[in-house]
Image (cartoon, rainbow, N blue to C red):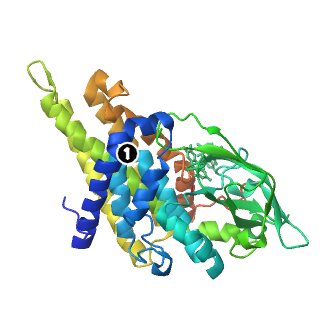
Amino acid sequence: MKRDIYTDDHDMFREAVAAFVAREIMPRDEEIRETRQIPKEIWLKAGEAGFLGIGIPEDYGGAGLDDFRFNAVLQEELAKAGMAYGSSVGIHTDVVAPYLVELSTPAQKERWLPGFVSGELRTAIGMTEPGAGSDLAALRTNAVQQDDGSWILNGSKTFITNGYYAELVVVAARTSDGPSRSAISMFVVEDGMPGFSRGRKLDKVGQHEADTAELFFENVRLPAENLLGDEGRGFPYMMERLAQERLSAAVVNIGHAAIALERTLEYVKERHAFGRPVGTFQNSRFKLATMVTEVEVTQAYVDQCLRAHNAGELTAVDAAKAKYWTAEVQNRVIDDCVQLYGGYGYMNEYEVARAWADARVTRIWAGSNEIMQELIGRDLGLGDPRPSKAEARPVAANPA
Ligand SMILES: Cc1cc2nc3c(=O)[nH]c(=O)nc-3n(C[C@H](O)[C@H](O)[C@H](O)COP(=O)(O)OP(=O)(O)OC[C@H]3O[C@@H](n4cnc5c(N)ncnc54)[C@H](O)[C@@H]3O)c2cc1C
């Protein structure tokens, strides 16, 4: 089915991103996966091309566009190259950007946004901790204010996308003992601050392009100017940004499934068994018919969410449905793609094998699919009528 949400401007932007991917990323893809990092020069070139500042005000070098379809085009094209290109850049442009644009003071904007746009300041977001993933309200990293107004930060974060190299990390930390809704604040931790260190690059099953890492904070002194927004409002800040974060995840998920399907279709027309293309067996035809239907129907829902988001009407629950469903479809479709490739589908040198490994995490991160189902179910008026103390906590649905 032909998609109708994009205009000529989006199509031109897509061509520019596709050309960038072909020129700057693909020739280095293997090296990037081996070293587990997208080199800084690629970030800088992406900045120069205008890809990192879509939603950043023009005063700070961005495009000042209030049209998330441009973000979606960027994600779709990057996901074609490998899922982690989409997720790493998406954390920067779709997840961190709203924090830095909407919560910062004019002085903070001056400090951080030009570098954000140019790629000089790569960003990450640190919410998850070893003891607090889905249950974000359990986070223990804490910041204590000093007499001079500065803060002393202690704790750790784990599984942080872009964590190894990011120059700026938005960190959620507890700033009082009260209930989480009013006890968490957001800070910006900068590369090189004494006491801020990173663990090794984590050894993931897939998404090898991404420098996912643990972060450690040992008596890190943060100037008062590094508090983002109001003290104690971190939890609502995170909740308010969920819809865009889930939508961004959904865009990448379905884009990644669509490209795997497209390439599988080409493969099954070429690959022969018993004297005929393997795609012409009835089982393959039915499988592919199911897959293409699932992808197109899901894409239509995601496109509707994109429209709603641009109109300021996308709810966190509808975005949760998009994140949940796209992750399920993506994993189902790519698993079937691997099956149609036969043994080659299990070889890392084949893109479909890597796509399969890349996709597995999408049911876990950005709020696990169980948490998404929980939120969707509660929205139906089906909350537990007798919550235990632990369950009475707000379901944070860790967005990152
Ligand atoms: C590659 C990767 C990159 C990531 N990037 C980031 C990042 O950039 N920043 C960041 O902050 N975090 C990041 N994360 C963390 C991610 O958001 C968490 O892994 C996720 O929220 C799940 O938390 P957890 O791993 O602690 O699992 P847990 O919370 O321990 O969950 C374990 C299982 O229990 C289920 N479960 C938990 N609570 C409930 C419930 N109430 N009802 C039903 N089932 C439940 C979960 O669905 C899951 O199946 C990343 C993770 C990975 C793997």
Q: Residue 357, percent across and down? A: 43, 35
Q: Quadrant of the N terminus?
A: bottom left
Where is mark 1, residue-wise? 330
Specify the farthest residue to the top: 274
In this rendering, is residue 245 above or below 113? Answer: above
Q: Answer with the quarter of the image where residue 356 lies.
A: top left
In this rendering, is residue 224 above or below 92? Answer: below
Specify the farthest residue to the left: 275
Q: Answer with the quarter of the image where residue 139 lies.
A: bottom right
Tell me, yes or no, if residue 398 can be seen here: no
* Residue in view at x 50 percent, y 44 percent: 210
How many tags in the picture? Answer: 1
Q: Nearer the viewer, residue 336 or 147?
A: 147
* Residue in view at x 47 percent, y 36 percent: 206
Q: Residue 328, percent across and down? A: 42, 46
* Residue in view at x 43 percent, y 62 percent: 47
Packing grade of label 1 (10 A; few <14, some 14-19, many >=20) is: many
Q: Residue 183, percent across and down? A: 78, 67
At label 1, the amino acid type is: Gln
* Residue in view at x 34 percent, y 28 percent: 349
Q: Quadrant of the C terminus?
A: bottom right
Report the side of 335 relative to 201 (left or right).
left
Helix, strand or loop under label 1: helix
